[in-house]
Image (tube, rainbow, N blue to C red):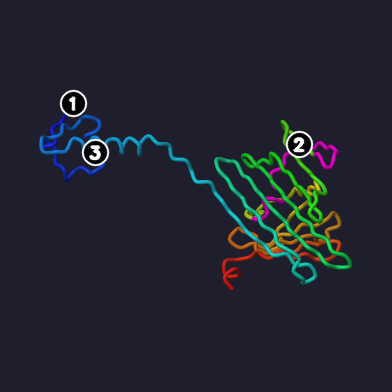
């Protein structure tokens, strides 16, 4: 049914509503209106209505300095992107140590989750600029195939939380954490508000993590050569 524009009280309609009625043919233009402009506006409305809008991925990045025995040894950077139940984490550790001997270690790690379940991970280790080892894990049906330098292992448990998630996903209520580099499943517990610890089978604390706003700010990790400290680099740190 066509309706003459003059029979409608314009003040009762928004501009978009007027344009919609015009484009759908329910309002008949009067002789004083520009038909070319109306056609152009109808085209724009069609693009706005029928062009699909995709959600912007959730993109989080952080950088951390690394200290061993109080001395700066390198940096760690991590990026997490997520969209439609898929989560991807990319992390790079770049460490240079000068003790009795000097060495340069770099870890490049990529982890993928889907609907809260670990799907795959790959860790490449470079020593003094050359690749030293490769470890990858892939979910196949309800199990995982892990290959580390030619050795194959089957893991039957589903993995819902691993070391890659620890930077932007505070482990509230999490009891177990899978370490991609060592293929170990360890216990993680809350020791105080926003503070968590990983302990070994003898209840000896291995790592501790401190959060603010759900993001890891500081960590202490026990290592054979001493305690490694991870400190988040903030905007104010960069500007100083």
- For image coordinates 75% across by 53% down, the residue present is 107
In this picture, residue 179 sits left or right of residue 116: right
Residue 51 within the magenta-colored segment of the rendering:
no
Q: Earlier in the sequence, mark 3 or mark 2?
A: 3
Q: Quadrant of the C terminus?
A: bottom right
* Residue topped by disc 3: 19
Residue 233 coordinates in the image, percent (x, y): 63, 65
**Are the residues at dot 3 and dot 2 in contact (C-beta closer than 8 Å)?**
no
In the structure shown, which secondary structural element does the residue marked by tag 3 occupy? helix
Residue 164 within the magenta-colored segment of the rendering:
yes
In this picture, residue 184 sits left or right of residue 13: right
Q: Earlier in the sequence, mark 1 or mark 2?
A: 1
In this picture, residue 138 sits left or right of residue 152: left
Select label 3 or label 1 by which is in front.
Answer: 3
In this picture, residue 8 sits left or right of residue 93: left
Q: CA distance from mark 3 to mark 2?
A: 56 Å
Q: Residues within 10 Å of mark 1 (few under 14, many from 20)?
A: few
* Residue topped by disc 1: 1
Q: Residue furthest front?
A: 129
Q: Residues within 10 Å of mark 2 (few under 14, many from 20)?
A: many
Q: CA distance from mark 3 to mark 1?
A: 16 Å
Q: Which residues are magenta?
A: 147-167
Q: Earlier in the sequence, mark 3 or mark 1?
A: 1
Residue 231 coordinates in the image, percent (x, y): 68, 65
* Residue topped by disc 2: 144
Task: Give 74 or 143, whichever is nearer the viewer.
Answer: 74
Task: Give 105 or 89, whichever is nearer the viewer.
Answer: 105
- For image coordinates 74% across by 62% down, the residue present is 208
């Amino acid at each position: 049914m066509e309706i003459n524009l003059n029979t409608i009280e314009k003040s009762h309609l928004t501009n978009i509503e007027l344009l919609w009625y015009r484009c759908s043919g329910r309002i008949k233009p009067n002789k004083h209106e520009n038909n070319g402009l109306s056609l152009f506006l109808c085209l724009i409305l069609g693009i706005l209505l029928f062009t699909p809008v995709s959600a912007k991925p959730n993109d989080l990045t952080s950088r951390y300095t690394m200290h061993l025995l109080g001395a700066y040894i390198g940096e760690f950077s991590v990026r997490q992107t997520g969209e439609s139940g898929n989560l991807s984490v990319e992390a790079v550790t770049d460490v240079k140590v000068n003790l009795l001997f000097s060495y340069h270690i770099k870890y490049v790690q990529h982890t993928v989750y889907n609907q809260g379940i670990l799907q795959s991970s790959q860790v490449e280790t470079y020593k003094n600029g050359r690749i030293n080892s490769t470890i990858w894990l892939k979910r196949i049906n309800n199990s995982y195939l892990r290959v580390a330098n030619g050795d194959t292992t089957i893991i039957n448990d589903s993995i819902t939380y691993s070391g890659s998630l620890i930077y932007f996903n505070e482990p509230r209520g999490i009891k177990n954490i899978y370490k991609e580099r060592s293929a170990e499943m360890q216990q993680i517990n809350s020791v105080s508000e926003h503070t968590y610890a990983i302990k070994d089978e003898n209840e000896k604390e291995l790592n501790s993590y401190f959060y603010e706003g759900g993001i890891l700010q500081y960590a202490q990790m026990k290592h054979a050569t001493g305690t490694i400290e991870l400190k988040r680099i903030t905007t104010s740190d960069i500007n100083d």
